[in-house]
Amino acid sequence: MKSHPGSPSRRLLFVALTGAFLGGLIVVSRWFWTDDTPRIDVAVADVDDEPEPVAQNPGYLGLDACAECHAKRVAEFRGTNHFRACRRPTDGEMPPGFAPGQGTLPTSRPDIHFEMTHTGNVYSQVTVRTGPGGEHRSVASIGHLFGAGGLDEVNFSWHGDHLTELPVAWLHPLGQWGHVPVNLNAPGDLGREGTFRCQECHNTWFAHVLGSIDRYKPDSFLFGVTCERCHGPGREHVTVHKSHPGHAAAEAIVHPGHLVRERQMEICTQCHSNAITRRDPPFSYRPGEPLAEHFRTLVTRHPEDDHVANQVKYLQESKCFQHSDSMTCVTCHNPHRPTDHAAVQKSCLKCHEPAACQERPRVPAGVRDNCAGCHMPPRIWVNVHFHTANDRFVPPIRRSDHRIAIHPVARDRVVLEWYRKHPETDTQHEAERLAHRQTDYWLAEADARQRDHRFLAAIAASREAARAEVTPAVRRHLADAIAAQSEVLDDLVEAEALIDAGRYAGAVNTLNRLLKLKPDFPEGHAQLGKAYAGEGRLGLAIEQWREQSHCDPNSSYGYVMIGWLALLEGKADEALEMYRRADEISPFDAEIKYRLGWALELNGHLSEAEAVLRRATAIDPGHVRAYERLSEILRREGHAEESISPARHAARLTHFKDADALMTLAEADAAAGHRKEAEEFGVKAMQTAPPDHIDAIRARLDAVRAGH
């Protein structure tokens, strides 16, 4: 059995592996598997003759198919935010920031700015860098936009079949451009991978390239969150109606209102929650199925750690929800129509009599019916934020707190706003008193959050205080929180650059400074582990990766790195423990499954290793090393003839130019008694091996020739 990988230096090995694994802190669940993965059966044709595996449409038709019978409902639905969740620039009005003179966005660096331009229906983001050699412009055409209801519009650009999220967005409530915090030292348009999980929550269906995180068939998108996301794929329903006009085809489509409450709620939970990590391919979930079978939900410590809004979690924590057996999201929100805020307010009266509100006699008559304002206050949720021309870490909107409760500070805010709209002389003293009380409350919150190193949360609290009154103390608190969060991110960028340059000692110093400022920052611990590994101090690296896992239990990265070192050192038990933990957190990561299969093999669990590796190849049909490892295990299990198929597939995927893949195929042929083919592929492996790998390939070829 060959060793993985074949470098003579453990230190150099670890430098290489950390560079490969740390593309981001959290190992994203990027690929998918099914429990009924078929046995591999691959033709011997050249790999170039095979199309890449792409997800097949299970029956999603799009909104127009529904409109044939439900025209009125569809017309009404087109006014909803869900319908506008994703669109093309040609599908509607574009932000006013594209108007002449409105399209420039500076950054914190004077040599870099963005320009948002358009010519006809072609809209673009231009990243402009100015240096000694003049001006360099990176142009990215906008292909898709996320955004709805006058909130913010996030732009995506096609690069071939890759869909990249661009950094600049239009912030409707602020009427200006902003960009996400981004490493301005990066090249190109500063875009980042647009993950399929993001796309899944903003679209009805699309065909993605299996094994990829951001590759799709561009013409496959059914844009927006439309009927079939709540009712299921409509093909069977439509077929029944067309073949049997007038037939009641309810059995061929899901009616969410007929589901039990938990299943009905989960239709919304699939996107309005922290259900981020997939357990199976995108769009596998069907309304009415248990959501936990398809997603692993992240558990967060603080609201600023939530994914987007997480409304369902907070609603379920409220007494209103817990004391009801029928309350769901649609109690207040009609999914078929644009939001009617007056109707939302009246939803409370379905269960509560106005006289039951003890505060009612003590507040102005004009706010006595504002139930949501007092009990579901719109708060600054800073987990989504942007840098604008004159501010940093700016949340574009406030979101309602769905944990329906008694919030005295929210009641005061509602009354304060009413007084400010009605500035009669006899109300101004009370308005000032409420403003001071609001400010004191939120500044105390900002102080507490700052002490806990929750700098984003401190920014949010300071901004809440500024809504009441802008005082020198408020400005100071906001500036201090912004400075602390900026320092954390700037140090992280600096450390990453030092690590990339091989300057590990400098990175260690920078990261220790960062972690002194924010001890619970998981990315800092992850990178410090990487820097220590680069120095060869692997014990310290492991300590940091363990701390990273403690700080972020939703990340598999620390377990992956510790497991990888254990694999390299032959510590089979430890490797298996680490990769089982990693696999539990990231159940559809093909690389983790590959490493888990390897650890299982080292522990002698060959049949389980085989099953895990088959899942890895189903998740990512292009994972060459998983096919190689699967071939080796099949040989060890005595299935020599069967071992040829995955080995040949690995060789074909590498165009018969990868020495390891060719040598694995030679070993499989030799085990099956195909001596001529084994010699042929073994010689070709020697011819293609890089100089530092020739000795390892020669040793394996000698073993084949010797019949071992």
Image (tube, rainbow, N blue to C red):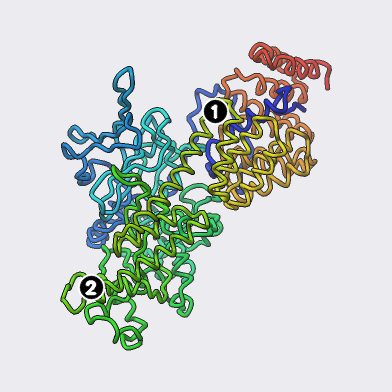
Q: Is residue 571 left or right of residue 523?
A: right
Where is mark 1, residue-wise?
500
Amino acid at the residue labelled 2? Trp
Residue drawn where x is 36% and y is 83% of the image: 352
Residue drawn where x is 68% and y is 48% of the image: 580
On the image, the x and y values in percent for residue 164 come to 39, 37
Of residues 450 and 703, the one nearer the viewer is 450
Residue 596, above or below 69: above
Where is mark 2, residue-wise?
418
Amino acid at the residue labelled 1? Asp
Residue drawn where x is 45% and y is 54% of the image: 307
Marks 1/2 in contact by CB < 8 Å: the verdict is no
Mark yes or no: residue 192 visible. yes
State which quadrant residue 88 falls in: top left
Q: Earlier in the sequence, mark 1 or mark 2?
A: 2
On the image, the x and y values in percent for residue 178 come to 31, 44
State which quadrant residue 530 falls in: top right
Mark yes or no: residue 32 visible. no
On the image, the x and y values in percent for residue 256 come to 41, 66
Helix, strand or loop status at disc 1: helix
Q: Is residue 210 left or right of residue 636?
A: left
On the image, the x and y values in percent for residue 431 come to 25, 73
